[in-house]
Amino acid sequence: MLPLLWLGTSTANAADLKLVVLGDSLSAGYQLQAGEGFPEQLQKALDARGHSVEVVNAGVSGDTSSSGLSRLDWSVGTDADAIIVELGANDALRGIQPDLTRNNLTQIVKRLAERDIAVLVAGMLAPRNLGEDYAASFDPIYKDIAEAHGALLYPFFLEGVALNPDLNLADGIHPNAEGVGVIVENILPTVEELLSQASKK
């Protein structure tokens, strides 16, 4: 075991940047095999494009924006250079008041910005069965926060995947391995912009 552990540490230390994915089950790899989750597939894509970056999976299934805020300091270490914030889907599924979600995500992005960490806000859309009023309050949260705190925005994390049965698990909510691949392909240019910002800090 020692040679393998040593090799893993060496690889991580060799990376110029550390990118943390702070999220819920959508990015944590819910019910997927090892290597199929978003952080792992993103790591492969970035490696293939020659980026010297270590992608860290800080996703916890079931997390709300409140949960993400409460664990922010120990989930995002002092060595983090860039963060993808992917939270809020569970807030919407539970019908949590959008004002609470907005406040939590604002605090997360604000505290990361104060630490001079480059931030990418991955947006979410409210399920339409919650009604037009809820969606009208929830959907703009991510753009508003990104603009207010100078963060990058990817408007909808599940773009190209949501509601497509071929790209989701049987629950119709979580992306399967192929769906994650689509997400990675779509978000990759914005992640590369994030890494460019981080390298200049």
Image: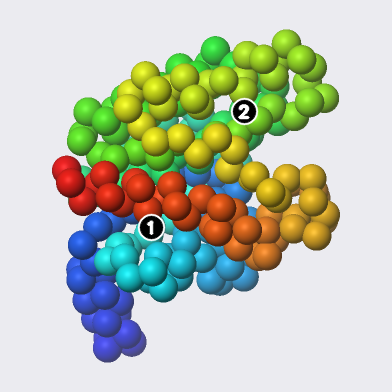
Compared to 166, does 81 lie above or below? above
Residue beneath label 2, please? 91
Q: In terms of sequence position, does the residue under pointer 2 or pointer 1 come before the other?
A: 1
- The front one of 194 and 117 is 194
Q: Horizontally, is 60 left or right of 166 in the view?
A: left
Compared to 146, does 75 lie above or below? below
Q: Amino acid at mark 2?
A: Asp
Q: Which quarter of the figure has residue 105?
A: top left
Residue that appears at 63% across and 14% down: 137
Residue beneath label 1, please? 56
User: x, y (%) of residue 140?
Assistant: 57, 20
Image quadrant in which the C terminus is located: top left
Residue that appears at 55% across and 59% down: 185
Q: Amino acid at mark 1?
A: Val
Image quadrant in which the N terminus is located: bottom left
Residue that appears at 64% across and 45% down: 158
Q: Horizontally, is 25 left or right of 164 in the view?
A: left
User: x, y (%) of residue 159?
Assistant: 64, 44
Whether residue 58 is visible, yes or no, is no
Q: Horizontally, is 143 left or right of 46 in the view?
A: right
- The front one of 171 and 140 is 140
Dot 1, crowdedness within 10 Å: few (<14), some or many (≥20)?
Answer: some
User: x, y (%) of residue 93?
Assistant: 70, 30
